Amino acid sequence: MPPDRRLLQVARVEAVGAYTLLVLRNDGGDVGEPGQFFMLQADPEPSDAYLPRALSAAWADAGEIAFLLDVRGAGTAALAGAAQVSVLGPLGHGFELRGGPAILVGGGIGAAILPWLVRDLPGPVTTVLGFREQRHAVCAALIDADATVVLEPTYVTEPLARLLPADATVYACGPDPMLHAVAALCAEHAVPCLLAMEAAMACGFGACYGCAVEIDGEWKRLCVEGPVLDAGRVLAGGHDE
Amino acid sequence: MNSLATRFCGIDLAHPVLNGSGTLDALAAGTLGVSAFVTKTVTLNPRAGNPPQRIAETPQGMVNSIGLANPGLERFCDEHLPRLADLGVPLIVSVGGWSRDEYAVAVRRIGAHPAVAALELNVSCPNVDTGCISIGTDPAETRALLERCRAETDRPLLAKLSPSVADVSAVALAAAEGGAAGLVLINTVRGMAIDRDTLQPLLGGGGGGLSGPAVKPVALHAIFHCRAATGLPIAGVGGVACAQDCLEFASAGANVVALGTALFRNPGLVEEIVAELPGLLEQHGVSTFDDVVGRAHHHQGKALLEVDANHS
């Protein structure tokens, strides 16, 4: 059963360069673990965005749940302007927080989910981030003051390649091509790698079959299997239909 | 008295709110309070479904291109059906296929399971090129399919029809003549979405099926005319999003309603509607949901009145 939807008040909204930080006042409800996700919809529901938005939190605890938004259309614009937000979650499977050193890799708005990992990972953390332009990179300050940041046309795989091989676990979130490149690089060096993936979702709880991505060589629902997956399950490939 | 209890095609239901086929995986998400569970369409062979991206938001709705992803008849019967039988609500299994033989094999096997209350013949999926919808666009093919499947099971057969045809009531009539016990109206309407940045189709399958409040008037029209043409019991689907919608669908001729897209944004919606409906019935001065069924036909002339009198 999906959890009940909750109506949470907006505590504050801040511009973070090109992105927008939305902080909700939590009512003490379960926030799950980093990498899980929530279905968010502005309340009252906007007339021009029918479906909720699937977002993983930037950080969360009993007091607040924070999301970094890339305001692109009516749904995210409504969230950025809302006084209260309907929240369904946490949903899906998040990151397994492993001991030992960690390398965090973030690309674009995918970097939004890394602050929580930096806070909760038990071992030493090295962070590499890639953004389109400087205005997107402003959010790096929320993640890790010591992060290595690259801007296009340099890709995040460049600083990552310099860190590998390493006795570490790689945690990555970003656009699909970046994730596949990171997964391939980690596989090459036999470094364990966890990917937080994204897909268009309607429901978030396994009902609609809309969020299928290639997992274990088949199209499977990302909301059920992920959104965090071991990179090996994504690299398996070979789907021939 | 329970104002919501009803009987649909011989199935006793605690209330008139179901799920549309393909909009709920009860094994993953539970039944969410529906009075009968309608499965995703099962086909003879397993189907991986269509390539991503499979869904896109559109004004007051969404388009989907799932493509009948399902485990196939064998695995459905061996692994899913025994678990679905334990859900505690009547089970309606949706069946699709590419030939009469394929439907017949599935109907025989699934219809023999004691937990199956009824079968829905999906002759209207917009996300496959052949079979299925090409049967449902042709009255003669639809009638022949119903006749063939009628011989394979004693369970009620429901025909799920597409509004993307010239005259859906002609197809409905053909289904009735072939032995359908009821109709499910409507499947999604063929549609498409274009990415605003790349100006390319958003869905991996190109086109898809439109659902959500955007299609509600299409559904009401199809229900109204198919009821007038056939008098068959109808499960109304297509943009139902609140208790008031349920009354409007009933008035057009739906005996029960099914939720789909609205469940995606609020999985608690069935329970909310079931809680609100009795009060809404009272406001309309009627004592049961059944009393609302077919009301919109009362002022539409003698022919419609006769159909209504015979079947409501």
Image (cartoon, rainbow, N blue to C red):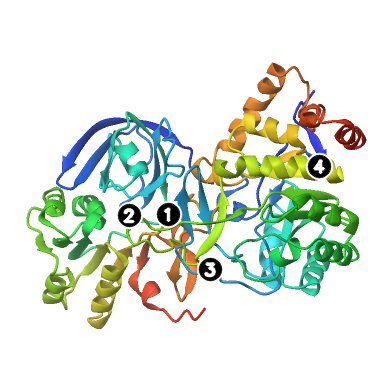
Is residue A139 among the parts visible in the rendering?
yes
Number of residues whose C-alpha sits closer than 10 Å to that of mark 4, classed few (under 14), some (14–19) or many (20 or more): many
Task: Using the image as rendered, state which of residue B116 and residue B134 is in the foreground.
Answer: B134
Amino acid at the residue labelled 1: Gly
Q: Which chain does the numbered disc 2 sit on?
A: A
Front: mark 2 or 4: 4
**Mark 1: which secondary structure?**
loop
Q: Which residue is mark 2?
A: A35
Task: Tell me, for residue B50, which label it has, or none.
Answer: 3
Q: Which residue is mark 1?
A: A92
The chain to which mark 4 is attached is B
Q: Which mark is residue B227?
A: 4
Identity of the amino acid at label 4?
A: Arg
Which residue is painted at 76% across and 26% down in the image?
B3
Residue A183 picture quarter: bottom left
Residue B298 image position (x, y, % from top left): 82, 28
B182 shown above or below B197: above
* Vertical position of residue A66 compared to residue A83: above or below: below
Identify the residue at image location x=86%, y=46%.
Answer: B230
Whole-number angstrom distance, CA of label 1 to CA of label 4: 42 Å
